[in-house]
Image (cartoon, rainbow, N blue to C red):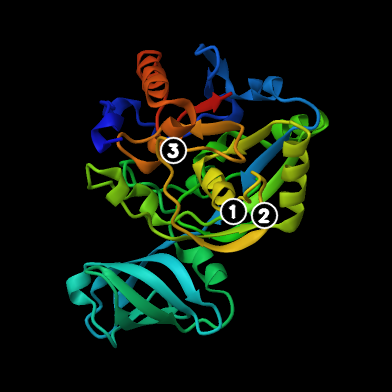
Amino acid sequence: MKLSDFKYNLPKNQIAKYPVSPRDKSKLMVLDRETKEIENKTFSNIVDYMSKGDVMVVNETRVFQARLFGKKEKTHAKIEVFLLRELNADECIWDVIVDPARKVRIGNKIYFNDKLWCEIIDNTTSRGRTVRFNQPGNVFKAVEKIGHTPLPPYIKREPEASDRENYQTVYAKVDGAVAAPTAGLHFTTKLLQKIEKKGVHIVPVLLHIGLGTFRPVEVEDLTKHKMDSEFFEIPAKSAEIINKALLHKQNVFVVGTSTCRALETSTTADGLVKPNRGWTDKFIYPPYDFKVTKKLITNFHVPESTLLMLVCAFAETDFVMKAYKKALKDNYRFLSYGDAMLIL
């Protein structure tokens, strides 16, 4: 497959700037891989496609307030510090991106308020730096009050107070993501209860989504693209429930491409999932043989993105691109705050 196989024209007015309310009233496009039928539904209808004994796997990563604005010591120059990942919790050492980078050198201190500051201890990439925070304990907690929601770059507006809740799944638990697992944004607590009442097991895994999710693929030959590494974890209990469903030929509904990548990273030779934790740079593009993912819930993705490539690997590129064409015609809302797709 080539990069250009995943190209389509996305009009700016179909990129959702805000989510619908309530969350589960977004549109749901249902694709049947066997019959090649495409249906338009509402997201709350998703429960109709599930049966007792099925499993739904969710990514319980939590988006933290990763955008900080501070002032450089002495000069008081305004500096944006975007937190990427925690490198060492005990020593409060983090990977960050700074802007404007030309003003930020090793040894500089950046103050965010009278309690929180960081010192630059290394350069990584052109805008990348390694910093040490002065805050012993939990940096996540410290930035929660003063940080800003890291909205995706294609949402052309400043974050608002409502984004703190909107750009977060209702089941988010573990701080660490700088982008939301967007397929999960459509679930309400009420809908999750309805799904559980039907006898479906909802099980968590973890993958902390990094900024790499927005990084464009810059090579036409996909075999030469390298994904950024992201931390993931599959608990033993979740693996056990998923494997029981697989052995009993029950459906495993996977919520989002991040959840899918975590599961597919950690499969056994006999097609089951094993408990695991670590870093993954798994890149899924056509053709790919999915071991664990039986049904996929996802959003509508950016042209030529690795997310779209994973979806095309699951449901055939021609079929997916046909569905995208229909979605554009039927006024579906695209990207993070947009509508959803269920692939059966």
Q: Is residue 22 visible in this depiction of the protein?
A: no
Q: Which residue is mark 1?
A: 266
- At which x and y percent is residue 136? 55, 83
Q: Amino acid at mark 1?
A: Ser
Mark 2 or mark 1, which has the lower sequence index?
A: 1
Residue 301 is labelled as none
Mark 1 or mark 3, which has the lower sequence index?
A: 1
Q: Label 2 to label 1, Cα distance in Å?
A: 6 Å
Q: Label 1 to label 3, Cα distance in Å?
A: 16 Å
In screen coordinates, is 304 left or right of 165? left
| 339 or 150, nearer to the observer | 339
Furthest-front residue in this view: 269
Q: Within 10 Å of the Cα at label 2, are there few (<14), some (14-19), or many (20+) other Cα atoms?
A: many
> How many discs mark residues in the rendered view?
3
Residue 310 is labelled as 3
| Residue at 28% in and 46% down | 217
Q: Which residue is mark 2?
A: 274
